[in-house]
Amino acid sequence: MQSVYEKIGGAATIQKIVEAFYPRVQAHPELKHLFPEDLTETMEKQFLFLSQFFGGPPIYTEKRGHPRLRARHLPFPIYPKTAEAWLACMASALQEVGMDEKVREEMWDRLVMTAYHMINQEHE
Ligand code: HEM
């Protein structure tokens, strides 16, 4: 069975998603203060992660070790509305890149689960 990574066209498409996503994050009032001004390294880490997450080569783990994503996000306060903001940026990025609806839904379900898993604050 083909992985999502293969179905969307591999590294080139992951790169497009990353490039469409971060300008939205940088412009979002709920998100921009959490991220460094220079997003070069953030984008590189996300490229490695999403490649691996969607069934491509395990390049994130090779370079950065076990993802431990929730632990890596603990320094940042993530409320339900922060996760919603992250997902809104991602939804819009996926739409810009454009892909088959079935595979988009498959990606979306996994992204939603992961984003909600990152929530580490209940109230403001
Ligand atoms: C890193 C925010 C959800 C994957 C980061 C960083 C922030 C952040 C501020 C640090 C950036 C840096 O120092 O370079 C958020 C917020 C989320 C969220 C507010 C809302 C729920 C997600 C999700 C994923 C993800 C759903 C994966 C599908 C990553 C990865 C890194 C990262 C791979 C880099 C980790 C590392 O290697 O250091 N995130 N994130 N994030 N995030 Fe998120």
Image (spheres, grey):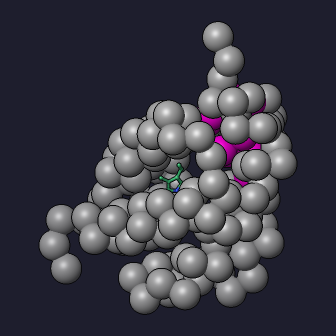
Above or below, comparing residue 16 to residue 76 in the picture: above
- Magenta highlight on residue 55: yes
In the displayed structure, does residue 49 sit left or right of residue 28?
right
In the displayed structure, does residue 7 sit left or right of residue 29?
right
Asked if one can make out residue 118 in the rendered structure from this viewpoint, the answer is yes
| Residue toward you, 54 or 103 | 103
**Residue at left 18%, top 65%?**
122
**Residue at left 68%, top 18%?**
2
| Quarter of the image where one finds residue 42 | bottom right
Name the residue furthest top: 1
| Residue toward you, 87 or 119 | 87
Q: Where is residue 57 in the image (x, y as percent from the top left)?
A: 79, 29
| Residue toward you, 118 or 2 | 2
Above or below, comparing residue 109 to residue 34 in the picture: above
In the displayed structure, does residue 54 sit left or right of residue 56?
left
Q: Ligand 1 is located in which of the four quadrants?
A: bottom right
Q: Give the range drawn in magenta.
A: 47-56
Q: Position of residue 119 (x, y in %)?
A: 31, 57
Above or below, comparing residue 90 to residue 6 in the picture: below
Name the residue furthest left: 123
**Residue at left 78%, top 55%?**
15
Q: Position of residue 118 (x, y in %)?
A: 38, 53
Quadrant where the N terminus sits is top right
Q: Where is residue 12 in the image (x, y as percent from the top left)?
A: 83, 48
| Residue toward you, 102 or 15 | 102
Quadrant where the C terminus sits is bottom left
**Predominant SS along the magenta part:** helix
